[in-house]
Amino acid sequence: MHGNELLLTILLTLVPVVLALGAVASARQPGERAWRTAQATTTGGLLLSALLLALSAAQWLPAVSGAWQTAPLQLIMLLLANFIAFVVVRYSATYLQGEPRQPRFVALVQATFAAVSAAVLSDHLLVFLLAWLAIGLAMHQLLMFYPDRPRAALAAHKKFLFARGAELCALAAFLLLYLHHDSARISVITGAYATPGVVLSATEQAAACLLALAALIKCAQLPLHGWLIQVVEAPTPVSAALHGGVINLGGYLLLLFYPLLLHSTPAQALILVVAGISSVLAALVMTTRISIKVRLAWSTSAQMGLMLVEIALGLVELALLHLLAHSCYKAYAFLSSGEAVQEDLQRRQAPGRRPTLSQWLSAGLVSVAMVAGLGLIVVATSDSTAFDVLSPWVLLTLALTVLLAERRSLVAADAGGRFLGLAALIVLAYFTLKSLFTALVPALPHTAPLWADLWAGLLFVLLFAGYCLQRYGLHLGWVQTLNLYCYAGFYLDEWVTRNTLKLWPHPLPDRIRAKQLLTTSREGSL
C-alpha cells in the first residue's frame, strides 16, 4: 500500500473510530462532560467527512482505498450521516437537560452513527452486514429509552424482529453473491454488472430479490410500517436520527447494488408493486393525521416508498437527490415539531378558497405547457436522457397543478404571477439538480420498461385523485368511508401486530393511567 493510500485509509477509518471512541468515553462521563465529548467527536466526524468529499471532488481519491469505498455516493452519504449526528447531538444537549441517563443516550447516538459511517464506507460484505446489525441494536436501545411506555416497547419489539428479518435477507443475498463471484468486495461484485446486456443466473436473480426485500423491510413499507409510526413515543432527537439518517439505509442498500437490481426484472417488479402501493397509501393516510410527529412518520414511509420506486425505474440520481433532501428536511421537521401549533394557527388565519373547475383546468394546462416546453428544449438542444422515463415528470406536473390551482387564499388572492414564477423555478430547479446528480452516480445505460413507467404514472395519478377526493369530496358518502379506512391505516398494522405477538410474544409494560399516577402522588405526599 502506497503512502498516500495508507494516509487516505487512515482518514477514512478515523470517522467511525472517532465516533466509537466518543461513545465509549461518553458512557463513563457525567452529563456535561459527556455532551462536550459528543460535540467534539461529531464535529470531528463532520469535518473529516467534508474534507474527504472535497478531496473526491478534486479527483484526488481512488474509487477504493483499503477496506473502504471512496466513490461520491459513499462520501456524500458519509457527510450526510455525520451532519445529522452533529445536529442531533447539539439539539439533544438542551432537549435532555435534567434527564439522569444523559450519558447513556449520548453514547448510543454516537455508537449508532459510528456504525452508519462504517456501513456507508464499507467495501466488504461482512463489514457492511455487521455495521448494519450494530445500527439496529443501538437504535433499539434508543427506541427503548423510555421502557415504561407501552407503545414504545411494542414498536421497538416489532422493529427488532423486522430488522432481523431484513438482515437475514441481506445475509442470504450476500452469501449467494459471494459464492457466485468468489469475492466479498462490494466494488468487485457491482462492477460485474456495470455493462448493459448482462444476463443473470437464477442465483443472481434470487440475490437481487432478497436485497429488494431487505430494503422494503428496512424502509418500513406497508404492511410492516407500524413500528415507524409508533416510535414517536421515543425522544424527539431519536425520531430525528431515525427518520433523518438511519431509515435511509434501506435505500442506500439498493443504491449500492443498483447495477445488479437494474438487470433483475423480478426484483424491480417487487419494488415497484410493494413500494409504489405503500407510497400512495401512506401519503393518503398521512393527510388524516393530526399529530405532527405521526404525520411526519407516515410521510417518511411514503417518501421511502417513492425513493425505492425511483431506484427501480433506474432513476438513481433522482433517488440520491431525494434521499439527501428528505433526510435534511425530516431531521429539521422533527427537531422543530414544537413549533407546529404556532404554524397551524398561522395557516388557519389564511384559509384557502376552493378552486373552481376552470382554475383546475387552467393550472393543469400551464403545468403541462411548462414541463412539455422544457422537454422540447432539452431534446432539441442536448442528448440528455432526462425525459426517457416520463412518470417523474407526470408527478411534477400534477404537483405543479395543485400548487397553481390552490394558490388563492384570503391573504394572497392576486398572487398568480408570483406562484407562476415559483412553478417555473421549481421545474428548472428539478431539472438542474437531476442533471447535477447524474454526474455523482456511475452511469449505467438503462431504460425503464414501458410497463414500469406506466405503472408509476398510474400510481401518481391515483395519488392526485385521492388527494382531491380527501380535500374536496368529503361530502360524498363513499369518500367518507374511504377516509375512515385511511384514518385507520387500512387496519394493516393491527393485523401485523396481532400476528407478530402471536408468533413471538413479548411482555409489555402496563399502561400508566393519569388518575392512578395522581392518586399515588397524593398518597406519597401524605
Image (tube, rainbow, N blue to C red):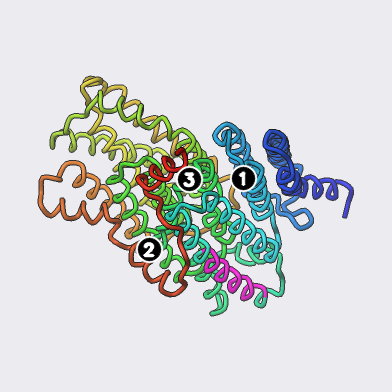
Label 3 or label 1, whichever comes before in sequence order: 1
The residue sitting at the bottom extreme is: 202
Rendered position, 323 above or below 253? above
Residue 173 on the magenta segment: yes
Q: Determine which of the numbered discs, if any, sits on residue 105 in the image.
A: 1
Left or right of 325? Residue 502 is left
Q: Amino acid at mark 3?
A: His
Residue 203: x, y in percent? 57, 78
- Mark 3 lies on residue: 322
Rendered position, 366 above or below 111? above
Residue 437 on the magenta segment: no
Label 2 or label 3, whichever comes before in sequence order: 2
Residue nearest the viewer, comparing 17 with 183? 17
**Nearer the viewer's eye, disc 2 or disc 3?**
2
Dot 2 crowding, Cα within 10 Å, few <14, some 14–19, many 20+:
some
Residue 350: x, y in percent? 25, 24
- Mark 2 lies on residue: 223
Point out the stretch of residues depicted in magenta. 163-178
